[in-house]
Amino acid sequence: MHIADILSGGSTSISFEFFPPKTDSGFEALYRSIAEFEPLAPSFVSVTYGAGGSTRDNTHRLVVRLRRETSLEPVPHLTCFGHTKDDIRRILEMYAAAGVGNILALRGDPPAGARILALGDFQHAADLVAFIRREGERLGVNDGRGFGIGVAGFPEGHPETPNTLVQIEHLKAKVDAGADYIVTQLFFDNGAFHDWRARCDLARIKVPIIAGIMPITTATGLRRMADLAAGTRFPASLLKALDRCRGDARAIEDAGIHWATEQCRDLLDKDIPGIHFYTLNKSDATQRIYRTLGVRAR
């Protein structure tokens, strides 16, 4: 199904993100977790693609298995860092043959320790979007409409582009190249998100914007998020709530889930088209939030 059809149904889209494990035992554990997500009937699930394509084979393996063995709509991440047009063409042909009709197109990052940003045949994510659009139409995906294409948005800014006006221009370029929707980087400050969303509207970015939410469940997870999502703001009121837990693991999890739930409630009150949960391959926290929101995915 084309992502535009999924997002045009009039109700809030709820979706989840998984990452491909590195071992067979990890895959089996993930499938058990996915079995807990499937009854929630999410609009789609995305599957990450490691820096520089480092999880390429496992990403493809997970996406194809989800397509064949579950009722879930898989949306693989695809990055252009270090890839040639032939590389991307082969990947798209494989997905088309497997009945995968949607892609999340990203520029991607170099693998850890890489000193040179070898971009391959694509300099920007907008270039990848345009290529996927042409190839999807050539392959006849989604009855000739091509792949449904998502792109990333950064409500609190991108560390490589501190000029916020230029950031919006880059996002607009991806949309103009053929993106159907935007999924944001995780954030904890809804005020920053709403301001960024208003600036997108001023820039005439009219595609649906899906908000990325990741509940904090551990103290180490908080630090890991700060490292992985450079530039993400942690509001003082959130940090105070976590500090009141005094290191108690259960209390930290409850406080983090409460904060994420309140974020989602505010987003729903303001008619956000969709919420995308970064699950870290675990279902408990996301399910606890989902059950309190009074929504049903489609």
Image: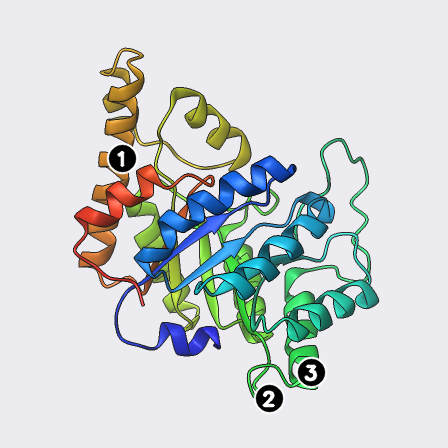
Task: Provide the residue designation for mark 1.
Answer: 257
Q: How many marks?
A: 3
Which residue is depicted at the point 20% across and 50% down? Answer: 265
Which comes before the other along the chain, label 2 or label 3?
3
Q: Real-space Cα distance between discs 2 and 1? A: 42 Å
Q: Is the residue under label 1 in contact with that under label 2 (CB below 8 Å)? A: no
Task: Provide the residue designation for mark 2.
Answer: 144
Q: Position of residue 256 (x, y in %)?
A: 29, 31
Q: Real-space Cα distance between discs 1 and 3? A: 43 Å
Q: On the picture, is 76 further left or further right than 237?
A: right
Using the image, determine if residue 16 lies above or below residue 8: above
Which residue is depicted at the point 76% across and 62% down? Answer: 122
Q: Position of residue 188 (x, y in %)?
A: 34, 39
Within 10 angstroms of label 2, few (less than 14), some, or many (20 or more) residues?
Answer: few
Q: Is residue 156 visible?
A: no
Name, please, the residue furthest toward the bottom: 144
Q: On the picture, is 297 further left or further right than 173?
A: left
- Secondary structure under the numbered disc 2 in the rendered image: loop
Q: On the picture, is 278 further left or further right than 138?
A: left
Give the amino acid type for the residue marked by disc 1 in the picture: Ile
